[in-house]
Image: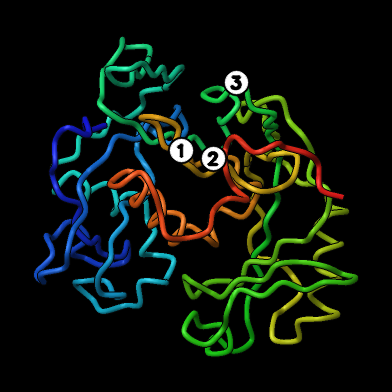
Amino acid sequence: MSPSSESAPWAPWPCGGCPSAASPPSDSTPTRPATTAARPAASHGSSAPPTRRGPRTCHCCARPATCGRSWNAAAAAAAAEQAGARIARYTPVTEVREDEAGVTVVTAEGERRFTHAVVAPGPWARTLLPHEPIVAKAITSTWFPHRDESLFDPGRCPIAIRVGEPAYSCFPSVDGAGVKVNLHVPWREIGSPESLARSVPAAYVRQVARAVAATLPGLRPDPVRVATYADAFTPDGHGLLGRRGRTVVAAAFSGHGFKLAPVFGDIVADLVESGATARGIGHLAPDRPLRRSP
């Protein structure tokens, strides 16, 4: 973590596939000031990827910044540290308290004081936002091999959402190894991310394989990877994004956070720097009445 009173800049970060992933940028991309981010254990104390407004390519290999490697957490953390940030690795955050003078971040190692904080706890949102009606749920993703890689290249293939039966989200092949497909099914609520069961029922795998075979002829219908992870959900399925005093809340994106991460990051940076954003985020206001969507 880096106290927000220190204005070390964020630099553009290289993609995770580059041999020069730890190299400093060679261009004159505008940078943003560093901010504090409090995250619990599973993130190993690292914050969300630093926001940048500059070239849309990796500075060392010219790959498109939309590629999955550009979101490599290790590369983002390395670039942040080079810019002056301090990352508290393997440091669970148990509480964030705000008062008139600043923000206190509580960990097992003690307390740290900051002028401002960004709370982006992922599936641990209930820990740091205990008064919000947030639940953790298990989400299962599957990756399928493509018959023609060019059809699913990020420069050509957008994120797609299919409605009807079967309903799913489909993502471009950001790493060249497989195409991610998420069925739209009711996700199972779990007590906490620590209690997440990593095994996946064979019936679910067969269900998503049938959907791919029926509607995605460009993919081979046998998955090469299946993974279960946790996310935080609000009753209406929309995240919490806004500023409360000295704290910016960016949490409980209900399964939509990854695909919208670039714009969410820009909005968080706006809120940190000026307390406001030109983008319409009223529907994500943390203080809105939270009701279950029909």
Q: CA distance from mark 2 to mark 1?
A: 5 Å
Q: Which residue is rendered at x = 39% and y = 59% of the image? A: 71
Q: How many marks?
A: 3
Judged left or right of residue 287, residue 24 is left
The image position of residue 108, as x and y in percent, is 37, 12
Given residues 73 and 112, the one toward you in this image is 112
> Do residues under tags 2 and 1 come within 8 Å of each other at their CB atoms?
yes
For numbered disc 1, what is the local secondary structure?
Answer: loop
Q: Amino acid at mark 2?
A: Ala
Going by the numbered disc 1, the residue's amino acid type is: Ala
Q: Position of residue 240 (x, y in %)?
A: 57, 42
Of the image marks 3 and 1, the number of the one nearer the N terminus: 1
For the residue labelled by badge 3, is the local secondary structure a helix, a strand or a loop?
A: loop
Q: Could you tell whether 63 is left or right of 39 in the image?
A: left
Which residue bears the numbered disc 2? 251
The residue depicted at 47 percent of the width and 60 percent of the height is 279
| Observer-nearest of 294 and 208 | 294
Residue type at mark 3 is Pro
Circle 3/circle 1 CB separation < 8 Å: no
Secondary structure under the numbered disc 2 in the rendered image = strand
Dot 3 surroundings within 10 Å: few (below 14), some, or many (20 or more)? few
Q: For the N terminus, which image quadrant? A: top left
Q: Is tag 3's residue or tag 2's residue first in the polypeptide sequence?
A: 3
Residue 120, numbered label: 1
Give above or below for 291 relative to 33: above
Q: Which mark is residue 130?
A: 3
Q: Earlier in the sequence, mark 2 or mark 1?
A: 1
Separation of marks 3 and 2 at Cα, in angstroms: 12 Å
